[in-house]
Amino acid sequence: MIRPQQKKQKELQKSREAMKSGDKVVTAGGIHGRIREVGDTWFLVEISDGVKIKIEKSSVYASTADAATN
């Protein structure tokens, strides 16, 4: 049971590292937005026109393209 969880975590980490400015994302809290800037451990996400929040990469669950396929 642990092995599938580790595999899923690694896939999620790879997808977070592949995200770039302009990608649509969903946070663990359910906030939808578009990445505007990428830092080492954070994303700057625009959730509305002119409204930007800085969030930790670990709190980004998936891009909306990934969420649509799951």
Image (cartoon, rainbow, N blue to C red):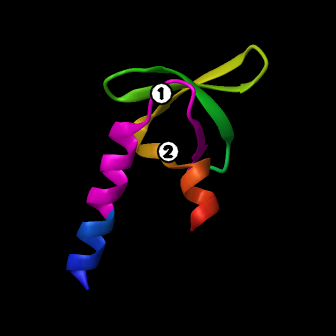
Q: Image point 27% across, 77% down: which residue?
A: 4
What secondary structure is marked by label 1? strand
Q: Mark 2: give few (<14), some (14-19) or many (20+) Cα within 10 Å.
A: many
**What type is the residue that disc 2 sits on?**
Val
- In what quadrant of the picture does the N terminus appear? bottom left
Real-space CA distance between mark 2 and mark 1, rounded to the nearest whole angstrom: 9 Å
Check whether the beta carbons of the residues at disc 2 and disc 1 lie within 8 A of each other.
yes
Residue 9, relative to residue 27: is it above or below?
A: below
- Residue at coordinates 36% horizontally, 38% vertically from top-left? 18
From the viewer's perspective, is 60 left or right of 26? Answer: left
Q: Position of residue 67 (x, y in %)?
A: 59, 58
Label 1 sits on residue: 43
Q: Is residue 50 magenta?
A: no
Residue pointed to by mark 2: 60
| Type of the residue with mark 1 | Phe
Residue 8 placement, left or right of 30? left
44 lies left or right of 49: left
